[in-house]
Amino acid sequence: MSDGAVTLLDGNTFLVSTDSGDIEATLADPAGLFSFDTRYLSTWVLTVDGMRLSSLSVDDVQYFETRFFLVPGAATVYVNAELSVLRHRTLSSGLVEDVTVINHGEDPADVCVRVDAGSDFADLFDVKNATAKKGTYLKRVEDDHLVLGYQRETFHRETVIRANQPAQIDEHGLTFTVHIEPGQEWSTRLQVEPIFVVRGRSVPLVARGATTRTIDDMAAELHRWLEQAPTLETDWEPLKRTYQRSLTDLAALRFRPAVGGGDSMPAAGLPWFMTMFGRDSIITSLQTVPFLPELAATTIRVLARWQGSNIDDFRDEDPGRILHEIRYGETAAFGEQPHSPYYGTADATALFVILLDEYERWSGDATTVRQFEHAARAAITWIDEYADLMGNGYVSYQRRNEQTGLENQCWKDSLDSISYRDGRLPGFPRATCELQGYTYDAKRRAARLARQFWNDPDYAARLEGDAADLKRRFNRDFWLEDRQYYALALAGPGADRVDALSSNIGHLLGSGIVDEDKAEAVVTHLMSPAMYSGWGVRTLATTERRYNPVGYHIGTVWPFENSFIAWGLRRYGFNEEAARIASGILDAATYFQGRLPEAFAGYPRERTRYPVEYPTACSPQAWSSGTPLLLLRTMLGIEPVDENMVTNPAIPAHIGHLQLLDIPGRWGYIDAYGRGRDRLTHRRRMGPPDQK
């Protein structure tokens, strides 16, 4: 997205424009109005008497509402326009835009207001890959509205544009001839409705799982969302802003899948990933479950609904496997990419089991655990029967769809993310280290669920035995004795050790798979100058051949990953190191107006006084928005253990007093607080919210 871009967002519908509100998208430009992976507006240009408008100010009221204050012509140092224009734009059941022209002059004004409109109906994958369309464009004027259409065989989409004031409508837009008296104003409401056409019948997108909402409904819903989250009190004001920004962005990224029971789950990130992602949705839910448990509940339900049931090489699907990504656009509909849905992820399946257990530990919702017993067992079966591609007892991956499947199916899914120290890329299959940690954690957690909720102690005992054996073998096979860290992966036909020093080893701490006598060496590497930039842990150490501070997975700092590393440090008792990572990431957030991006550059902190932006990072992104919440949990040391809540703070000194009020959970509502690095005390607050 270009500098100065203004975004509106509501679930998987979003709009990107210039600071004047105009849209003039090229094929490779993610500007426009998108919904369900299709661009419904690629041109949306407002002129007054043939003149383009210049921005005076943009008021981002809410994530779904923006006001543009404009004047006709070029804005110079001296502005004395006799006309001004206000565009008030909202996303609610499509795009609604109120255009108001105000006459500040002493004489009446006869004005021509024109809106040029067009749509290329680009699939989001078309935009990413600059791919030409293959269907037919349709345009027609019907009574009081303009219809823009696109059809390729049975794939048929339309954009319907109408106004509530008389207009001359042609195939390229709407023209209003307006008379405005001195000191008066004229306005019209423009409505843009995205449409699926199914068997000749027009189906508004709002009818596909969403609910018609007014702007007042959306504002009230946001207020309820913010009110139900715990209240944060701290001496450090930037943390309050970051926390509020994160909660608001998580609200913006919610969407309601058709099988979600009416509740919402997080889309992954703007602009490229505004859809359901197995890994991203699970990780975001793990980060936020003590704060916003409804995200976890819906994520579990929806991912179980889409759990793999067949062997499908094109989609890399197996029975029990949790999906990677689902798309609704043209390229998925015609099999030009496999995301309908696509299952090419090796970590989401174990993470699904981890989330199910973590959700119950916080919520006490035994009903959900019992309801999704089959899904959890199927996930474990996938790990045991389908994921061991090398026959050595480790989860590994190799795509079966050689044309359009993902080559790397761990979270670092770019082509060069897995390498040896000397920069060579290993062969396949690849068993990255963190996949084994997730598997160990999943089996331990599934054992707890089997014993306590599924009435199957024999299954629990088998899982515990499997996990213990995995931990023993992992610490033997992955440990690089001469380097004192774990191999990034075992890879290729010979299961060679891939020896690059990477952030993946930080994930192992959170899983518990690291032997106690190896933990300190791992932490020493993570906090070394080669790995820790001062803002956070880099994805790849500066000592490695492929290190690049602006490489997507080979030297950048990812906030979400750092939140998981800090969480794992606390598990092994490295409280000071966890606090240091939390401090660096939260400091970085202050330079992004409280909104942590997907990633930022891995330059050392002493070289730059601020974190350097990664040029194409998604923002907002779900697991980056969830990062401050997991860091708050980590700093306060809040953990559910059996039937108790334990707390043990490790708060950076500059944050000072830190307090979370009304944390929801199986215990009722709990307050947690501490100061600096003092030990945390807490008190219970029982009863429903109305008894607080």
Image (spheres, grey):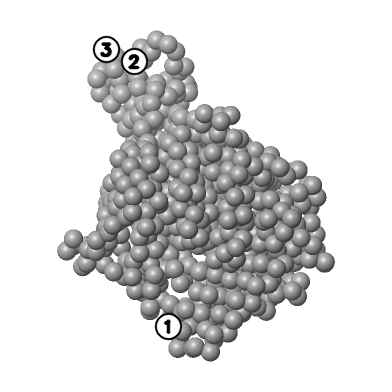
Residue closest to the far right: 494
Residue 218 x %, y %:
32, 51
Report the residue that reaches farthest toward the front: 517
> Alpha-carbon distance for marks 3 and 2?
9 Å
**Residue occupying image coordinates x 49% and y 88%:** 457
- Residue drawn 57% across and 81% down? 463
Query: Element at badge 1?
Result: helix
Q: Is residue 23 above or below residue 297?
A: above
Whichever of callouts 3 and 1 sits on the residue coming sooner in the sequence is 3
Q: Nearer the viewer, residue 540 or 297?
A: 540
Between the residue at mark 1 and the residue at mark 2, the CA separation in whole angstroms equals 73 Å
Image quadrant holding the C terminus, namely bottom left
Residue labelled with disc 2: 82
Name the side, left or right, on which 337 lies relative to 106.
Answer: right
Residue in front for this viewpoint, 245 or 305: 245
Circle 3/circle 1 CB separation < 8 Å: no
Tell me if residue 184 comes above or below residue 168 in the rendering.
above
Helix, strand or loop status at disc 2: loop
Nearer mark to the viewer, of 3 and 2? 2
* Mark closer to the observer (3, 1): 1
Vertical position of residue 425 compared to residue 391: above or below: above
To which residue does mark 1 refer? 452
The image quadrant where one finds the N terminus is: top right
Amino acid at dot 3: Glu
User: Disc 3 and disc 1: Cα gap in Å?
Assistant: 79 Å
Q: What is the three-letter code of the residue carrying label 2?
A: Glu
Q: Quadrant of residue 229?
A: bottom left
Q: Amino acid at mark 1?
A: Gln
Q: Answer with mark 1 or mark 2, whichever residue precedes in sequence.
A: 2
Q: Secondary structure at mark 3?
A: loop
Asked whether 514 or 363 is in front, the reply is 514
Residue 106: assigned label: 3
